[in-house]
Image (tube, rainbow, N blue to C red):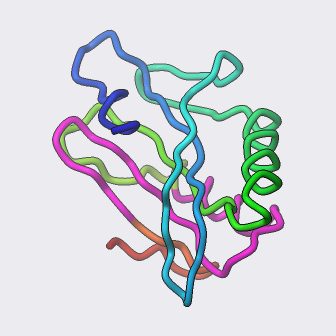
Amino acid sequence: NVFKKFIQSKDNKNESGGILLGEVINETFIINKASIPNKFDKSSKYGFIRDKDIAQIIINYEFINSNSKCIYLGEWHTHPEKNPTPSNQDINMIKEQFSKNIINEKYLFLLIQGIDGLFISVYNGNKLTTL
């Protein structure tokens, strides 16, 4: 529902995005939270840059209030195309998140909500695999 709320179905709507949170139980990834854009994010029709400080506050809050169960699992954003595909900037961003941050698991998810479709992928440090 969060992703659908921000679909770029109108020409004047900017890209939106946030972080994906959830837990891992017996090697099963459960994404059960997605942050919404905030006033510190930067967005345009063809770009979205999430504010890292606000994202970290959200991650810390959810981690602490879940007894260390709710963790950062990846990123989401919108694209103004019917069936979205990741740009080079999107791919570089998820690679950077994986390599430059302390993450709790060996995978990060990248979700891109398009006008009609949803692109879902997982990055393992070497390869971005479409699910």
- What is the count of numbered marks? 0
Compared with 20, 69 (above or below) is below
Q: Is residue 71 magenta?
A: no
* Outermost bottom residue: 26
Residue appearing at x 56%, y 53% in the figure: 20
Q: Camera-side residue: 109 or 62?
A: 62
Residue 15: percent from left, percent from top: 44, 27
Q: Residue at x 57, y 39 (%)?
A: 35
> What is the quadrant of the C terminus in the image?
bottom left
Question: Looking at the rendering, in which quadrant would you find the N terminus?
Answer: top left
Q: Quadrant of residue 100?
A: bottom right
Q: Could you tell me residue 24's position as x and y percent?
A: 59, 77
Position of 11 with respect to 49 (left or right) is left
Image-quadrant location for residue 82: top left
Taking the spot 78% from the left edge, 65% from the top edge, the residue there is: 68
Q: 115 or 21, which is in the foreground?
A: 21
Indicate whether 25 appears above or below 83. below
Q: Position of residue 110 (x, y in %)?
A: 48, 58
In the rendered image of this protein, does residue 67 appear above or below residue 114?
Answer: below
Residue 18: percent from left, percent from top = 57, 40
Assess whether residue 95 is covered by the magenta stretch.
yes
Residue range in magenta is 91-120
In the picture, measured across the screen, residue 54 lies left or right of residue 17, that is right
Q: Residue at x 69, y 62 (%)?
A: 71
